[in-house]
């Protein structure tokens, strides 16, 4: 039970895909001019994350290692196609608002990264929890960013007027520079919270801290090119 809770909660803050792993940055910055767009994009990505994690985990012993990445992309593209059909049929306004970023979920680094790093190595249950936790962490980031940018940049929140009419909105926040500013502030806030709660992930230097250690077996060349140790 503790392992399942840890897998689920990792994506919420400690390994938040946007604020800590810095993945999926393009949709994070592009669709968060409105809170409702951030919510829609986050839920769409969560649906694909959970479904693709489950499918890839179930097929992990069947997919040949040499073609695993094309196979993962095929599985992800299948669920994105299903998602697009559903959104076009039932929420056409959201489909129009998200535009190209909805089909681009296929190449979202978060989804492909979780397929490679987690779903291909763990059981179906844990993979589903990992996808749900990462998806909710991503959704939360998009909603918070969208809410801040919409409130300060347009004076509304989910389309409802919040700021008094005599207060001029700071339109900078619904522009790309405003998105980068809010994104940076949220990243700094998460790091500050981790430091204050003594929950910051320690990263080792060397083979054991290298993301490619699984590929080379932790046996790095003794000398680099040019003869330097």
Image (cartoon, rainbow, N blue to C red):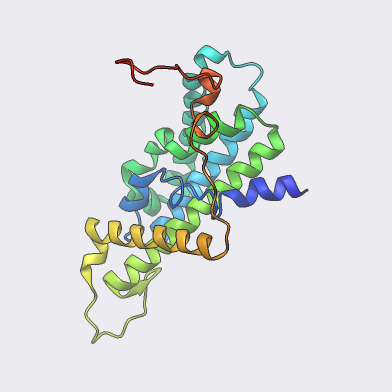
Front-most of 93 and 176? 176
Q: Quadrant of residue 144?
A: bottom left
Front-most of 226 and 147? 226
Residue 186 appears at what percent x and percent y?
A: 40, 61
Residue 101 appears at what percent x and percent y?
A: 35, 43
Report the quarter where the C terminus lies.
top left
Q: Quadrant of residue 148?
A: bottom left
Residue 149 appears at what percent x and percent y?
A: 32, 66
Image: 26 above or below 71: below
Residue 160 appears at what percent x and percent y?
A: 38, 75
- Left or right? Give the position of 113 relative to 30: right
Front-most of 42 and 120? 120
Looking at the image, which residue is at 66% across and 18% down?
Answer: 61
- Left or right? Give the position of 16 relative to 27: right
Looking at the image, which residue is at 56% across and 54% down?
Answer: 12
Q: What count of labels does the image hold?
A: 0
Looking at the image, which residue is at 29% across and 58% down?
Answer: 179
Image: 192 above or below 101: below
Furthest-right residue in this view: 1
Image: 98 above or below 127: below
């Amino acid at each position: 039970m503790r392992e399942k809770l840890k897998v689920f909660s990792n994506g919420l803050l400690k390994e938040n895909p946007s604020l800590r792993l810095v993945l999926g940055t393009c949709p994070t910055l592009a669709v968060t001019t409105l809170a409702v767009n951030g919510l829609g994009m986050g839920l769409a990505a969560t649906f694909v994350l959970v479904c693709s994690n489950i499918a890839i985990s179930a097929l992990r012993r069947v997919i040949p290692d040499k073609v695993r990445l094309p196979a993962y992309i095929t599985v992800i593209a299948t669920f994105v196609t299903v998602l697009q059909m559903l959104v076009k049929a039932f929420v056409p306004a959201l489909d129009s608002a998200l535009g190209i970023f909805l089909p681009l979920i296929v190449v979202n680094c978060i989804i492909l990264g979780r397929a490679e790093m987690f779903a291909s190595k763990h059981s179906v249950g844990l993979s589903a929890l990992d996808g749900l936790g990462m998806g909710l962490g991503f959704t939360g980031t998009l909603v918070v960013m969208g809410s801040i940018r919409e409130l300060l940049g347009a004076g509304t929140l989910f389309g409802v007027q919040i700021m008094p009419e005599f207060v001029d909105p700071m339109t900078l926040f619904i522009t790309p520079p405003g998105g980068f500013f809010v994104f940076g502030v949220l990243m700094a806030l998460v790091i500050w919270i981790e430091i204050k709660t003594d929950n910051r992930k320690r990263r080792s230097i060397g083979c054991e801290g290298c993301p490619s250690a699984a590929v080379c077996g932790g046996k790095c060349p003794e000398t680099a090119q040019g003869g330097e140790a």
